């Protein structure tokens, strides 16, 4: 490709709204352009990188035995209502009506399409297992799209769905995907961790995330200093503290705490550590009130509450709801909870007693609140958020928190979808059984952004060779010198002949502009043909990632470039 | 691929709603499955064929110098309102709102996205020409989706957009696409015609359609017996009849025609040929009334009226509108038309006089109606539909009408989009000029259906080699005989080694079922390994398209298959 024709105009400055490096650089390096919030057009350079990722994924998926299909983007509402996701996704799912007023959605993932499909074709145990995948655009109407491709409303995803006879089969299918994902992310050159994760609105049980490490990542993960535990912060558990023992139950006593609706304010007033307080947070779970209890020095993890209540959509009470449902905002305690309220206590609440908590009337708290005697707990769950420094659930070592971008997520769904969709096969004994399903996602457009976050410097992008839109740029520094142009043309066609993806920067601009663009776009290898080099019969080579430079004789430059490129990351 | 694992279950019968061969066979041969009206999932076999078409298109588009990009499917309403297409498409465009109540659409074609994109990047005449394309799913909410992939609501399209400085450049860009399209359809093996066409709701001037010949096609085209003219029936002109001369203008006379609101009924009553009647059809064009006049023996071509009124959306009057707007349904004549009505007469109306037409009051017609004396014509246009037997506009020869499926459509748009979208470049003289645009579409999913229509027989599909999901099927007739299985396995791996796309039918079903499936799916070459053949060391080969059979020694079968396959269509 000749740069003079390439549809790519680099930008000196990124728009002010671009906050993170990947967003800024992908715009500046003419890889993407914004159409509207969270929705981007892919220019030729960005599209080529995306296509290379697609090819890697397709190869590894096919090698794993998965079969490629293509499901519609526009989906009917009915199966989504059957699984509950029409409601769970709520406003996050784009919804529309066709001209006959039929309700449709734009698919965020496609369990509701693929499950009935498989049930219609592979209805016998003899047909199983099968794993179907597609690479297609997905939609999520994010409340606040941001960070360019990192939180977009339209994104390219590889989604695979496995169907097995039994749990053992599911584990094998899951393992095959787990390993295929490792090969995929390794080939993309990403630095990543595999962590235990939260299933989110997909549902299911065992699941893992592939997290590309990145300081700007919004996805936090916990990892033990001893390396034996790594988990998404939304799923991570800390070891519950030892029972410190309540030698004597204090009496339940009401104390006046005027104008002190927050934990810290009350703790201050009573000169107690926040850890002695019992925090009682109220949620709405599909219409039902859920009270969650955690020690005052910890946060409730809303995702864990959602998981405990799946598939009901869970949200914190809004201000007006407290009074409407008979609660006193700022002074809620678990005592005398009505029977229709579900009380979930974090496991850590069991290790202590004599809690200080809200008195359920304005400006008052109670001290000496104890489980069973003063309040009931309907379910004990892990609903608190892990903090830096918490003890590891495996070894008790210290947990640390890191930041990342989730680029892959695999799930053991079990029968979470096959049951509500009545998707069954006939087993060997003649009985109808729901499929044991797994689902497996990779965000292709996110990989582009994650790579840009991991591999860039002040001057621009540093594409790994496998994902670079072009592997080599040939720069002719003096387009007004026929000998230079001729030598550059020769090298360009030799490199094309060698099967490399090459750009020839034949533009009528200064060498400085060409160097800056080559750095910004991040071609892995730059080959410079100029007047002075030509006099000594040589070209200057540079590896963008390492900055390594060397001269090559023009007569052997093509071979030298192939060899040098093989050493690039 | 082993048939025992392939996600493909053929059907004995197609669902009753499948009316045409392509729809029936693509369902029966497990290429597609319906999700809802006009929306299909592509199973592995269909997806492979679609991918092969995609690869051919990508190769030829890249070779023509076009650059691949990827534009969003979800598009903002604003630019569509600027070009008028938000209204022109009306209910045919899927429309939705995001959670912030912003109006969005699903793109049917993407002029409104690509035009501002190019204006933002290639703003100088030095940058031009440029041709950008994408291969992406498109959406049209058809009133009556039918015929499977032929009239779907979600379809895969290659859409390209060229941008030039001037009309001469546009013609060159157009020519390059014209020729690339010939190569693409030739490589797909389609039988097709290139015809002059109607621009429909895309707009613009010169345009051509690539029509795959098919008896079930809904797209009619006109072709001259002498081969010098071919056009879409919606665009075709016939030579206007000679002026037969009105020697004497008869007086305008009202006649009673009770209960005879139709042309034929009145012609019967007055014992006149329908050709003496003047038909006056009323349209609404974006709120304005348009009266169109054609001789009584001809039909008004609504698409031509729409073209004359572009970009206003044009539709026939609904029954209730006649009275509301002061007309008498069934008795409309062009006399005393209000000034705000636009009167368009077909050119053929100019060749005659003394017309019989409606009297604008119930149960009455007039005779002796003549242009100018009795009614005005605001515009003379070609608005009538060509009929079998009409004279060719080029040579006067006889025109015939054929049926086809439009698989490609290319347009010289000129400034139809760049002007309303204010998309300009700076020309050599420093002035701002709107781009001269072309747009170029290919329906990939339609090619699949058109090929299935053209290439099938009673037993199933007859895929051309270039598009077949797999080129060869190896059939082992006796899976219970280890020697047969072993010989088939060997051949299977030899063919894979030779780089062919091969299916090994290793299923535990009868040979009859395997033969029937191989015919139904339409693999170009069948290689049968059975017990009897094995005794003589041979395999039976069959070319599906021609039925040609031959034996091959197992020791050389792989080479024979490669050679025989090369002779397949």
Image (tube, coloured by chain):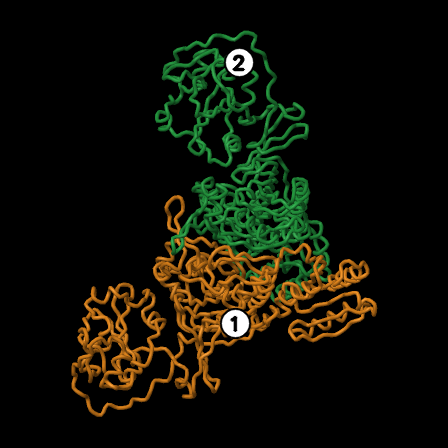
Chain colours: A green, B orange
Q: Nearer the viewer, residue B250 or A12?
A: B250
Q: Position of residue B249 (x, y in %)?
A: 19, 88
- Residues at marks 2 and 1 on the same chain: no
Residue found 39% across the figure and 48% down from its top: B97
Tell me, yes or no, if residue B86 can be seen here: yes
> Given the current orientation, which residue lies at the most extreme front position?
A430
**Vertical arrangement, residue B460 with respect to residue A545, above or below:** below
The quadrant of the rendering that contains the C terminus of chain B is bottom right
Left or right of B421 on screen, residue B160 = right
Q: Nearer the viewer, residue A112 or B432?
A: A112
Parent chain of label 2: A
Kindly state the secondary structure of the residue where label 2 is placed: loop
**Vertical arrangement, residue B166 with respect to residue A124, above or below:** below
According to the image, label 2 marks what residue?
A353
Label 1 packing within 10 angstroms: few (<14), some (14-19), many (20+) = some
The residues tagged by marks 2 and 1 sit, at their Cα atoms, a distance apart of 81 Å
Left or right of B364 on screen, residue A218 = right
Q: Position of residue A335 (x, y in %)?
A: 44, 17
According to the image, label 1 marks what residue?
B176
Contact, CB < 8 Å: mark 2 with mark 1?
no
Q: Nearer the viewer, residue A412 or A35?
A: A412
**Vertical arrangement, residue A554 with respect to residue A305, above or below:** below
């Amino acid at each position: 490709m000749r740069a003079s024709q390439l549809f790519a105009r680099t930008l000196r400055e990124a728009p002010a709204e671009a906050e993170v490096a990947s967003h800024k650089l992908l715009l500046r390096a003419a890889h993407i352009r914004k159409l509207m919030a969270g929705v981007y057009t892919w220019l030729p350079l960005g599209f080529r990188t995306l296509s290379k990722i697609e090819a890697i994924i397709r190869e590894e998926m096919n090698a794993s035995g998965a079969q490629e299909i293509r499901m519609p983007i526009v989906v009917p509402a009915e199966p989504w209502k059957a699984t509950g996701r029409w409601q769970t996704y709520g406003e996050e799912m784009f919804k529309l009506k066709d001209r006959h007023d039929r309700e449709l959605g734009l698919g965020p993932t496609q369990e509701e399409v693929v499950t009935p499909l498989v049930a219609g074709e592979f209805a016998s145990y003899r047909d199983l297992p099968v794993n179907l995948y597609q690479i297609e655009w997905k939609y999520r109407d994010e409340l606040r799209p941001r960070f360019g491709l990192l939180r977009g409303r339209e994104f390219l995803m590889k989604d695979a769905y496995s169907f097995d006879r039994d749990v053992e089969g599911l584990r094998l299918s899951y393992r095959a995907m787990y390993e295929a994902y490792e090969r995929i992310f390794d080939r993309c050159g990403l630095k990543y961790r595999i962590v235990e994760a939260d299933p989110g609105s997909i549902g299911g049980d065992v699941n893992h995330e592939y997290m590309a490490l990145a300081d700007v990542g919004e996805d936090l993960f916990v990892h033990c200093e001893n390396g034996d535990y790594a988990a998404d912060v939304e799923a991570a558990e800390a070891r519950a503290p030892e029972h410190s023992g309540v030698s004597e139950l204090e009496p339940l006593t009401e104390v006046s705490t005027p104008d002190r609706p927050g934990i810290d304010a009350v703790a201050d007033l009573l000169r107690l550590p926040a850890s002695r307080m019992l925090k009682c947070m109220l949620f709405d779970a599909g219409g039902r009130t859920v009270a969650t209890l955690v020690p005052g020095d910890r946060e409730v993890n809303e995702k864990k509450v959602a998981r405990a209540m799946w598939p009901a959509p869970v949200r914190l009470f809004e201000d007006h709801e407290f009074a409407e449902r008979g609660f006193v905002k700022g002074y809620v305690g678990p005592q005398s909870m009505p029977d229709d309220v579900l009380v979930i206590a974090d496991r850590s609440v069991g290790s202590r007693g004599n809690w200080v908590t809200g008195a359920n009337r304005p400006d008052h708290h109670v001290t000496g609140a104890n489980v069973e005697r003063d309040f009931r707990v309907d379910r004990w769950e892990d609903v608190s958020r892990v903090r830096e420094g918490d003890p590891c659930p495996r070894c008790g070592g210290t947990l640390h928190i890191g930041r990342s971008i989730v680029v892959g997520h695999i799930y053991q769904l079990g029968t979470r979808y096959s049951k509500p969709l009545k998707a069954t096969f006939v087993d060997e004994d003649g009985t109808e059984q729901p499929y044991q399903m797994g689902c497996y996602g990779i965000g292709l457009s996110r990989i582009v952004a994650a790579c840009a976050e991991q591999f860039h410097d002040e001057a621009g992008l540093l594409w790994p060779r496998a994902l670079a839109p072009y592997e080599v740029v040939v720069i002719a520094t003096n387009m007004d010198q026929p000998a230079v142009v001729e030598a550059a043309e020769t090298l360009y066609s030799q490199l094309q002949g060698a099967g490399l993806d090459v750009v020839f920067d034949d533009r009528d601009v200064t060498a400085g502009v060409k160097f800056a663009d080559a750095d910004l776009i991040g071609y892995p290898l730059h080959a410079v043909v100029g007047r002075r080099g030509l006099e000594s019969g040589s070209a200057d080579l540079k590896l963008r990632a390492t900055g390594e430079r060397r001269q090559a004789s023009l007569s052997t430059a093509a071979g030298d470039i192939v060899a040098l490129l093989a050493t690039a990351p």
